[in-house]
Image: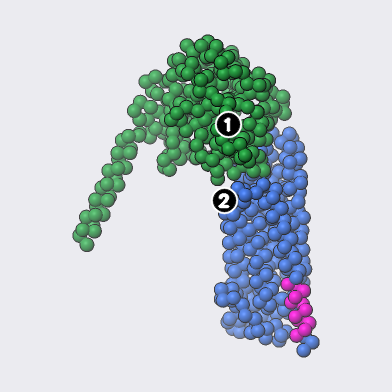
Chain colours: A blue, B green
Amino acid sequence: MLMVWQSDTLISPSPVWYACASDVGVKGGSELKKNTIKQQAAALHGFESSALARRVVLAVAFTNGFVIMAIQLLGGRIMAPYFGSSVYVWGSIITVFMLSLSLGYLAGGRLSTRQPDVRMFASFFLASAILCLPIIFFAEPVMSQIFVVVEDPRYGSLLTAGLLYFLPICVMGMVSPYSVRLLVRSQEGSGGVAGMLYFVSTMGSALGTLGTSFYFVLWFDLDQVMWGCVLALLSCGAAMTWVNQHVNTANRQSGAK
Amino acid sequence: MRSVSACLIVLVVLWFGLDNRAVAQRTIIHEERSQYRDVVVTEFNNQRCMLFNVHRGDMNQTCIDLRDPKRLVFNYTRMSFAGLLLNPDPQRILVAGLGGGTIPMVMRELFPAARIDVLEVDPAVLTVAKAYFNFVEDEQLVNHVVDARVFIKRAGLRGEQYDYIVLDAFSGEYIPEHMLTQEFLQEVSQILTPDGVLVANTFASSRLYDYESVTYRAVFGEFFNFKTAGSGNRIILAKKQALPSIASLNAPARQLFERLQPYGINLLEYPAQLSTRPDWDVDTRVLTDQYSPANLLN
């Protein structure tokens, strides 16, 4: 327990991040609540106190936001040959993405409350990468089937968007609340942590939108950009796994001293 | 200080003065709210025009001459009737892109027995075409409020065929990228009768010229390229069968000349202006559903 506190002073976080999410003023808070958070944090074995770990979590949150919007923009182009590019096709896509994200937030938040585990967090990225593969391999057959069965392009596009995007985007939505949980060290600092994570992930979304609509579609095939997204998600999973082992090793070493 | 306020006053007067002049030039007689972009009807100099994105200074989509409503105002609209050189007597006509309904209405008058389907995705354009541009639907001429690609794909599944197809959905600021691709043109080819003709209004300037040219070439092989001086448009005339010789087009031109004259179309001039010679970069990449950044290339 004490180790967690002491390690606060050992890390040298980047100034911006630290200003947002530092635990300054935590001593004025309720001792009881503070203890609860600390006890749960113990399950993470000091993960949230490692400066490196924090930076990696921010980086994967950024990438996650980036990939979500890249996939959304590609979605409009993937579906246009079957359902047109009318307003309601975009309406379908945005509806499904928002619905998936909202349920993902809910599920990710729930999962984070008991026994938060960095390995589970890493597995979100592996899962979403795998769930993106049907978009590459099965979008055509799925759409040609739905095109025949559903005459109205509004419901055709809604059904297609639901089938192709619900699961991967839902899992990507789980990343956000879970990453808050991984980084929060005190109740007082939780808003700062959440704000910082919203900041980087939404910044990622902004750049993902810009990059995809301005450049990627000009440089690559749609499927190539999708593969880029899959690779980015896998890299996030790998980075989290690596940093988790790194922190655990460091903890063992400092525990041995 | 005083001179600054004087400058400001001068600027304000100039601003409103210019603004008033713009309004005097072009009277807005109707604005129709749309899901896509508001449709504006203006009148100036005895011309009534339909515009999109009027505040950004977009060009006229379609215009009619109020003194002589039959006469076609735009060169590219007249040019699109060059398709009649390749199929002088169409029976099943498909027009993608309504605008003011000029092309389908002229076709309706020229070929009373023909069955004409028009595709327009924006219901506001249909409303305005009917109210201000004399567009009338009847049992022979029907507009479908649908994305043209969706309609054409479905028509292909139903096995329907047309012997005269006009693609004119590309005017305005935003280009529907899914209607420039090889896959789309293959779907169009599927609903084209063996002796039918495809008339496509495309971009003559910008990098898209090369991209569109190689894509049409990939699907239809050699096609007639139709450009006239002073027009920002290029008309592509394509067939599934081999193209006839240009000399053989003079006969249908003479045959139809008188019927097209009231619309201001001089069909006799057209055959000599057709060309099959590629004047584009033939190494350009073909546009596909996987790669169609048309709005970035324009």
* Quarter assignment of residue A245: bottom right
Q: Which residues fall within the magenta stretch?
A: A243-254
**Is A252 one of the magenta-colored residues?**
yes
- The kind of residue on which mark 2 rests is Phe
Q: Quadrant of residue B24?
A: top left
Subunit that carries the residue with mark 2: A
Residue B239 vs residue B62: left or right? right
Kindly identify which residue carries mark 2.
Answer: A214
User: Which residue is painted at 51% across and 20% down in the image?
Assistant: B272
- Image-quadrant location for residue B142: top right
Q: Quadrant of the N terminus of chain B?
A: bottom left
**Mark 1 Cα-neighbour bin, 10 Å: few <14, some 14–19, many ≥20:** some
Taking the spot 69% from the left edge, 34% from the top edge, the residue there is A151
Magenta segment's dominant SS is helix
The residue pinned by badge 1 equals: B278
Q: Which is more toward the observer, B36 or B251?
A: B251
Percent of width and height locating residue B36: 52, 40
Look at the image and tell me whether residue A152 can be seen.
Answer: no
Q: Secondary structure at mark 2?
A: helix
Q: Position of residue B74 (x, y in %)?
A: 44, 27
Q: Secondary structure at mark 1?
A: loop
Q: Residue at horizontal 37%, vertical 20%?
A: B67
Which of the chains bears the disc numbered 1?
Answer: B
Please provide percent x and percent y for residue B143.
57, 26
The image shows residue B298, relative to residue A60, as above or below, that is above
Left/right of residue A53 with respect to residue B253 in the rendered view: right
> Above or below — where is B188 with respect to A71?
above
Question: How dense is the environment of label 2, judged by Cα within 10 Å: few (below 14), some, or many (20 and up)?
Answer: some
Cα separation, mark 2 vs mark 1, equals: 30 Å
Query: Outermost residue toward the bottom?
Result: A257
